[in-house]
Amino acid sequence: MSSWEFEVLFDINAEGSGTLMDGEWADGYWQDIPSEIRVGKMGYRTRTVKAGPRLEVEIYPIFGREKTRKTRAARKNVTPDVVQRCNEERAKRKLTQLIDANFDENDIHLTLTYVGQPPKYEQAQKDVKNFLRVVKRKRQAAGLPPLKYIYTIEGNDDGTRERIHVHIIMSGGIDRIQLEEIWGKGYANADHLQPNENGLEALARYITKQQRNRRRWARSKNLKRPKQRTSDTKVSNARVKRLAMDFPNSAKEIMEKLYPDYTHVRTMMRYSDVVDGAYIRCVMRRKPERRQRK
């Protein structure tokens, strides 16, 4: 099953443990937890994504053939709108992982704006590429490592809504005044990144808040990819049942026991009225002492 299929099949939310990010895991129709959660007797698959100090854990049931008809019937009722919303949410999570895997408090968030009449979107793309090309040369001349970046272009070029502007998450090392001089088309506001327990997720969501129906972000080719692993033995059915029956109270204890190098940040659990099983997602943060060793 793909990501959106789990999202729509497991659509009954248990109250989460930890603080939800805007738009994350919340559908606006919270329902009461049933008196007895049917976690089933099936095995559970665990997928982990390590992105710098960030760890995301996804736990979901492994369905046998007997569940195929039910899950297929449930998927038939899914509207394209729901699929798109789920895919957009997944895309934001992947961007967050990419940012956390490559940037930290030594790097910067740069906002570029235009003075006067803003250009069309295509011209803004050219302007950003030219800007990054000059920054790369400056870094090379200063003996700095190759530039890493992710940028987004927001706003509209029809003059009816927010003016076109650019957000860039990039390697630190070049002075803010120099960056303003290189841009030369308006204001260049640079701030050091400030990751919290959620890493840089809030920033990732902020710079992609307008990107519905069209991806408007690009990245350098030298970014590290988050590391993904899958296991069918990491989390037992019994542990899932314990987590489900005492959720959210047991989430922190269980997840930190499974991943002792990490601190629990938040956990989401969902159930289904179509099939047995539970769908769990958890965000964790590597402990500072473990981070220093790395």
Image (spheres, rainbow, N blue to C red):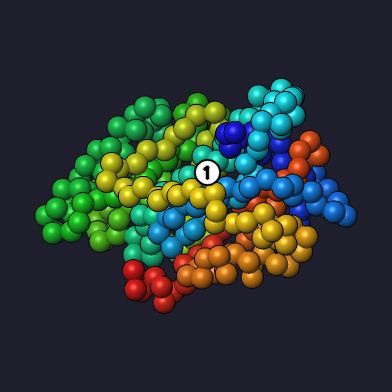
Residue 82 location, x and y as percent? 67, 31
Residue 166 location, x and y as percent? 41, 42
Image quadrant holding the N terminus, namely top right
> Residue lying farthest right?
35
Q: Amino acid at mark 1?
A: Lys
Q: Is residue 162 in view?
A: no
Q: Which residue is mark 1?
A: 92
User: Could you say which is closer to the camera, residue 89 or residue 225?
Assistant: 225
Seen at 28% across and 41% down, the residue is: 221
Seen at 64% across and 70% down, the residue is: 253
Q: Quadrant of residue 104?
A: bottom left
Q: Is residue 14 in view?
A: yes
Near mark 1 (Cα within 10 A), the count class, few <14, some 14-19 or many ≥20, is some
Image quadrant holding the C terminus, namely bottom left
Is 69 placed above or below 231 here? Answer: above
User: Could you say which is closer to the camera, residue 258 or residue 158?
Assistant: 258
Q: Quadrant of residue 3?
A: top right
Seen at 51% across and 50% down, the residue is: 231
Q: Tell whether 169 sits left or right of 162.
A: left
Seen at 34% across and 33% down, the residue is: 125
